[in-house]
Amino acid sequence: MAIALWCASLVVAAWALRARADEASGTWTGELEGRGNYYYERSTRVMIPTGRLTLEAPNGVRMHGEYLVDVISTASAAARSDSQDNVFTELRHGIGVGVGKLFTLGDHELDLSFHGIYSTETDYYSWIFGARASYAFNEKNTTLALGVVGVHDIVYRNLGTLGMHDPAFRGVLDGVTTSLSLSQVLSPVLIASLSYQFAYLTGYQGNPYRRALVGPRPLPEAPPEDRQRHNFEGQLQWYVPASSTTFQVFARFYTDSWSLQAITPELRIYQALGRDWTARLRFRYYLQGRASFALPHGQMAYAEGYTGPLTNDHKLRSFHSEQLGLRITYALTGLQGSALGFLSRAVLDVSLDHQWNNNGFNSPNNLIGTLGGRLPF
């Protein structure tokens, strides 16, 4: 499915390129991207074909539209209970749009953008909407950015057949996230950036199908309804011209009002391999403690008579994970001057990541693969 979507995207891009030439305007530019993502673990398979079209008008206004579908095959009984083998396929659809414009203010630049995303599944609906402003100054060596994003989710619980909701359950989640970032060019080959993100969530933040044991009794999961999240990140990028190598180092620290804390160092190495090929090697380590109300490792149930927040989410317990990945990118510049010359600006990429974790969440070993391409025009 992902490959078919990508091929269809190239056909549309070729048509768009020729249509522009026929109109002899030469003023509209854009990019078409198709991508297929695949996630594998012991009990779940997820395929995510995506498509995105970006356009920029002669007056500098940018527009984009995107669509994705999650094709989820799982052995969980989370969305239906009438399957003979407890394996089913469920779809999640997501549609996104956005608009933006770059304003030149003398030697400075102001970039404003707005976006919205709507996604739906058989048991939830989600609306995400946001705005971002970035200001480049100091001969465009310094960039300050501010973003605000809101979310409104409605969660249901399916009964028996997909799409048949339990009338006794309806969860609502609202939230807002603000972000502030600063990027600084330190030299022609060195860039540093810092960012801070704060999120406030209120409403239902559990899983309507998950149960937690209190003594011998399974009760519905019931985490706190309010959560404040803080995320800090630093990044350093260093380009080595002699070897055409770029190093990226990330360091992230997370903490929230549920007393959950995490650190995430990450290293990425980009290596140019001739004119058309680029390889990226990535290693990410993640370490977190547990939420204050989550059970420690080895404990299966809350004590009899416990009346506080409840969860059986392994992702709220203490654990660590490692992720190692390789991505190969190929630019189709060799097609220039041929019958397929309209594809000479296209770039293809394929990646595979392997993740190890010790949190007992479905599988300790997961695979994440991506195949995609983009075509500027």
Image: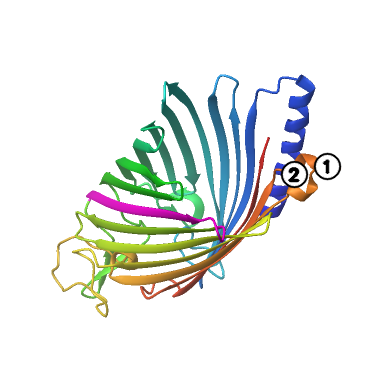
Nearer-the-camera pick, 221 or 140: 140
Asked whether the viewer can see residue 319, the reply is yes
Q: Is residue 232 above or below residue 152?
A: below
Q: Nearer the viewer, residue 23 or 74?
A: 23
Q: Residue 264 appears at what percent x and percent y?
A: 34, 63
| Residue extent of the magenta highlight | 225-244
Task: Determine which residue is flagged by label 2.
Answer: 344
Give the percent coordinates (x, y) of residue 159: 44, 55
Which quadrant holds residue 19? top right
Mark 1–mark 2 distance (CA, rounded to whole Å): 8 Å
Residue drawn at (36%, 38%), measured in percent from left and top? Answer: 142
The residue drawn where x is 13% and y is 69% is 305
Whether residue 1 is visible, yes or no, is no
Horizontal side, residue 143 vs residue 218: left or right: right
| Contact between labelled residues 2 and 1, with CB atoms less than 8 Å apart | yes
> What residue did someone put label 1 on?
337
Provide residue 258's location: percent of width, then percent of height: 20, 57
Quarter of the image with the C terminus in it: top right
Q: Amino acid at mark 1?
A: Gly
Seen from the viewer's position, the closer of residues 187 and 220 is 187
Total numbered labels: 2
Residue lying at 57% horizontally and 41% vertically, measured from the top left: 67
User: Which SS class for mark 2?
Assistant: loop
